[in-house]
Amino acid sequence: MENKQVKIAIEGMGCKSCVAKIEKAVSAVQGAEGTVDFGEKTALITAPDHSSSAEALDAIRKLGYNVSVVA
C-alpha cells in the first residue's frame, strides 16, 4: 500500500522547539511521519491512510496549534 501525503498549514508555531513537538506528536501516530517547515509554517504529513492522517492532524491540534489542509 502506498502512503498518502498531505500538506498542512500550521498557525501558532512560534519557535523552533515547536517543530520538534509537532514532529514527535505526528510520529506517535502509528504509520505516520511529519516533516515541519518552520519558515513556511507548514508540514508534510505522510501516512498509510486517511484515518492516520486525520489522527496526526488531531495530535497537532491537541498541542494547541490551528491546522488546515493546503494540498
Image (cartoon, helix red, strand yellow):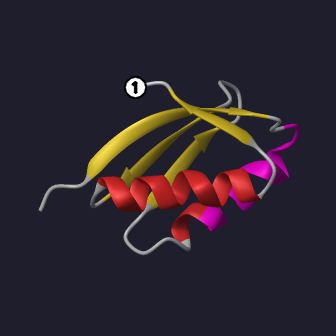
Q: Which residues are magenta?
A: 14-25
- Whether residue 18 is in magenta: the answer is yes
Q: Which residue is mark 1?
A: 71
- In the visual, does 55 lie left or right of 15? left
Mark 1, Cα crowd under 10 Å, few <14 / some 14-19 / many 20+, is few
How many callouts does the rendering have? 1
Name above or below for residue 40 compared with residue 59: above
Please give the name of the residue rendered at 87% of the width and 42% of the height, measured from the top-left corner: 15
Residue 30 % position (x, y): 42, 75
**Nearest the camera: 35 or 61?**
61
- In the visual, does 54 lie left or right of 2? right
Please give the name of the residue rendered at 81% of the width and 45% of the height, measured from the top-left corner: 16
Q: Main secondary structure of the magenta part?
A: helix
Please give the name of the residue rendered at 56% of the width and 62% of the height, measured from the top-left corner: 26
Callout 1 amino acid: Ala
Please give the name of the residue rendered at 60% of the width and 56% of the height, measured from the top-left corner: 58
**Nearest the camera: 20 or 58?**
58
